Image (tube, rainbow, N blue to C red):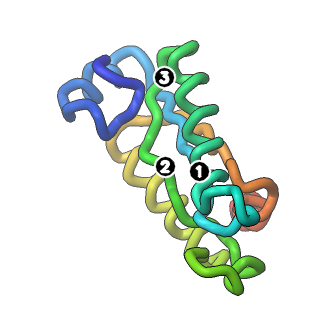
Amino acid sequence: MKSVWIQENTWQDVADYLKHDNTVIIPIGSTEQHGPAGPLGVDTYAAIGLCEDAAKQTGVMVAPPLWYGDSPHHLGFPGTISLRSETLILVIKDVVHTLYQNGFRRFILLNGHKGTNLARCADDAR
């Protein structure tokens, strides 16, 4: 594997990976305010770092990060980008569905945006 990141590999590299493992980590963050000193992408950067560290230690692949989260509470701050809860749930489902079609069977969702992003996703899955 050239990289733990799916997007940095060829489709042949991913096919070779799937011959011995079918796990993928999906980093989910947000683009929202974090005070005057924090960059808008801090939640996504945290998810990226945690996923990359875990992947390097375990040899699993990581999907490209989702930079958008459920952040309507921060819309008063310029640069915040928010998805409706329903949209975020559908995006995550589509990502998992297409990765499943490719042969992945074990999915680890790593939420860098505290409880805001995924609490409703978990409720929806029941």
Looking at the rendered structure, the secondary structure element under dot 3 is: loop
Residue drawn 50% across the image and 29% down it: 23
Q: Between marks 3 and 2, how big is the CA–CA gap?
A: 15 Å
Quarter residue 11 falls in:
top left
Q: How many C-alpha atoms fall within 10 Å of the one at disc 2: few (<14), some, or many (≥20)?
A: some
Looking at the image, do the residues carrying marks 1 and 2 touch, with CB atoms under 8 Å apart?
Answer: yes
Give the mark, 3 or 2, whose residue is nearer the N terminus: 3
Looking at the image, do the residues carrying marks 3 and 1 touch, with CB atoms under 8 Å apart?
Answer: no
Residue drawn 34% across the image and 21% down it: 17
Labels 3, 1: front one: 1
Q: Between marks 3 and 1, how big is the CA–CA gap?
A: 19 Å
Numbered badge on residue 65: 2
Nearer to the camera, 94 or 74 = 74
Residue to which mark 3 is pinned = 60
Q: How many C-alpha atoms fall within 10 Å of the one at disc 1: few (<14), some, or many (≥20)?
A: many
- Residue furthest to the bottom: 76
